Image (cartoon, coloured by chain):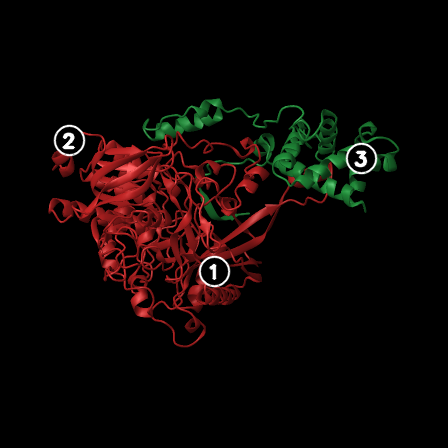
Amino acid sequence: MQRRNALKTVAATLGGLLILPAWADRWTPQTVQFAPAGKRLLSATEVDLLAEITETIIPATKTANPPKTEIPGARALRVHQFVEKMVADCYDKAAGELLRKGLNSGVDEMAQTVTGKPFLEGDAAQRLDVLKQLSTSTDATQKNFLALVKSLTIRGYMSSEYVMTNITHYEMAPARYNGCAKV
Amino acid sequence: MTNFNIDAVAQNTGTPDRFDAIVVGSGISGGWAAKELTGKGLRTLVLERGRDVQHVTDYPTTMMQPWEFEHRNQLTREVREANPIISKCYAFYEGTEQFFVKDAEHPYVQAKPFDWIRGYQVGGKSLMWARQTQRWSDFDFDGPARDGFAVDWPIRYADLAPWYSHVEKFAGISGNKDGLASLPDGEFLPPHDWNCVEKHFQQKIAGKYADRHVIMGRAAHITKPQPIHLEQGRAQCQHRTICERGCPYGGYFSSNSSTIPWAMRSGKMTLRPHSVVHSIIYDDAKRRAVGVRVIDAQTKEMQEFYARVIFVNAAALNTNLILLNSTSNRFPNGLGNDSGTLGKYVAFHNYRGGISAEFDGMLDVKTDGRRPNSPYIPRFRNLLKQEQSGPASGFLRGYAAGFSANRHARADQSGLGADLKQSLFAPKLEGWRVGSHMMGETLPKETNFVALDPNKKDPFGIPQLAISVDYDENDNKMVKDYQEQMTEMFTVAGFTNIRVRDDHRTPGLDIHEMGGVRMGRDPKTSMLNRMNQLHACKNVFVTDGACMTSTSTQNPSLTYMALTARAVDYAVKAIKNGWV
């Protein structure tokens, strides 16, 4: 309801001249809409693996100081959905193939080499190790796959509601410009 | 108020297709025509080919947070592939798709490559414009006659100055009174603030060059609302810098937030969206235009509307298209086209050149908040006279430039896992970056023209516009000079790692196309007289970008607004006195 309250403030400023539009009530934070099953880029299994990869890239952590509350990682913020959505809708078709190839073979091949078991069977440290190896892999598919997923994970995470609200404190209407603010 | 509706009285009082005035288009100049005409008591029909866009109510993305956009404001592959032209426009993104014309909607012929950027809705492109508003000076109006291109402007600054004031007060223009002869001061609201590096640049340039000035941009933002703005229901700009999605505060000027609702409240305006104007009806017996033919975009039916005066404000090239398509026994080559100049002498602004650099100093300060504006460098090349020696003698006219400095914090993204997260949450301030882009005057030439394609029709059966507009050697030389001069100026300011660019963008992407229905003193070489009337059909006025005899280097919208208000004032006098 933040949006409607913000609009109400505007309306009050303008002495009630503003008519509140219908859409001010209708939006929900869950803006990610997916194509029906079967038309999605990724299968349920691939989505699960992608979620764990994004969580390994940006994991849930605790704040350094008490009360040591949890700062969610990529999985809890559904960044994997964002990654799938962007690759499916915005990127070239080749990126979709790269994503699926990585999820279907690239990641687990590397996991077998590094840890001797599939990615999902490894613990957090082992998973991180696998991704580090992928990032420096001489295999172009493996390396490009990680670069693609990593860049989209960072983008999706940093532009999530949680991070922009609680960490980076995005201001929609700063109502100011100070060109010489002390650092 | 006098009843001007003479035709209605004489022919068929009270029918819904008869008005005192018709305005074709509801964009930045059409909105002004509507406001001024209704303000003087004329029953006015405003025809808009697109849908209605009501202030606030029809800005679906204006209050959306970044994370609410499905693709975080990036265009989808489907949209990009279906719209290679409009996808090039800097203001076209997920949050603004609804305000731009898609490529297939209104096809045109690129006789030469031209990106035609359009907004078909009530408000037109005034919803998404860049809001820079500078007055012309006599150095600009004198240009064609002094330097020997195009034809002499039939007006000078003194003709327009009171009308600049008139529109500025209502629209709300922020700026500083800089006292420059090249860029006359206006009725300014307080200017936006500088940052330290921009101020540094201003001082260094002032210390080195007597004739070059760096000033704060003059922009159509309400920095301090006056009673006239509050009366419009508009409030102070909140520095959101997402203006092109529509502003719920009315913080910047648009037809939607300002002139159109104002005209509506007069009770004198009939606004008719979905009305594609096919042509203007010329009556051979009455020897004047009597109305317009409209195709209803929804029913595809053609209908006629009649009025005593007609203002054509369809946006520069569409105004050309309508006049070219308005043929009659008297005007077989397009309405008012005795001179044969209709569609010709189209010009635009050259935005190809740019420059970027870094500044190592002032690391103890940064910026805070956002600013919907930036500093501006008025034209200094060939300003007082055409240079006969030195680099500027190699080309006619000159360029203005935008300038800005900024400082961002960036995170090291090299790690993975908890290390990466920690680094993302602790971005480090980088040094200052500075940049500039040029806005060059292009010369109106007969060889830069638009015409009706003889075969191709649009979805309404109206001939497609064939656009044949290109750069020339004068433009290339100007890009080079801009790069050289800005490099020198950046060096003077101590900027480092200076990089110049020429992006070779296609004409049109500047969205400053002008001309084709130019003003002039002589009916043999121009279309419009000094009051923006067609020389040969005096009850038709053209006051959008099509009327421009030359382009100079100012962002043009403010001049269209002033020309429109001035022309309406004259048109109403002309009706009263029976001149039209």
CA–CA distance between discs 3 and 2?
Answer: 79 Å
Q: Position of residue B157 (x, y in %)?
A: 26, 59
Q: Colour of chain A?
A: green
Q: Is residue B514 above or below residue B258?
A: below
Helix, strand or loop under label 1? helix
Out of B330 and B165, give the one closest to the viewer. Answer: B330
Q: Quadrant of residue A96?
A: top right
Helix, strand or loop under label 3? helix
Viewer-side label of 2, 1 = 2
Residues marked 3 and 2 touching at CB (< 8 Å): no
Residue at mark 2:
B13
Disc 2 residue type (three-letter): Thr
Viewer-side label of 3, 2 = 2
Q: Is residue B569 left or right of residue A183?
A: left
Q: At 45% across and 25% down in the image, what residue appears?
A: A23
Disc 1 residue type (three-letter): Phe
As drawn, the chain in red is B
Residue at mark 3:
A105
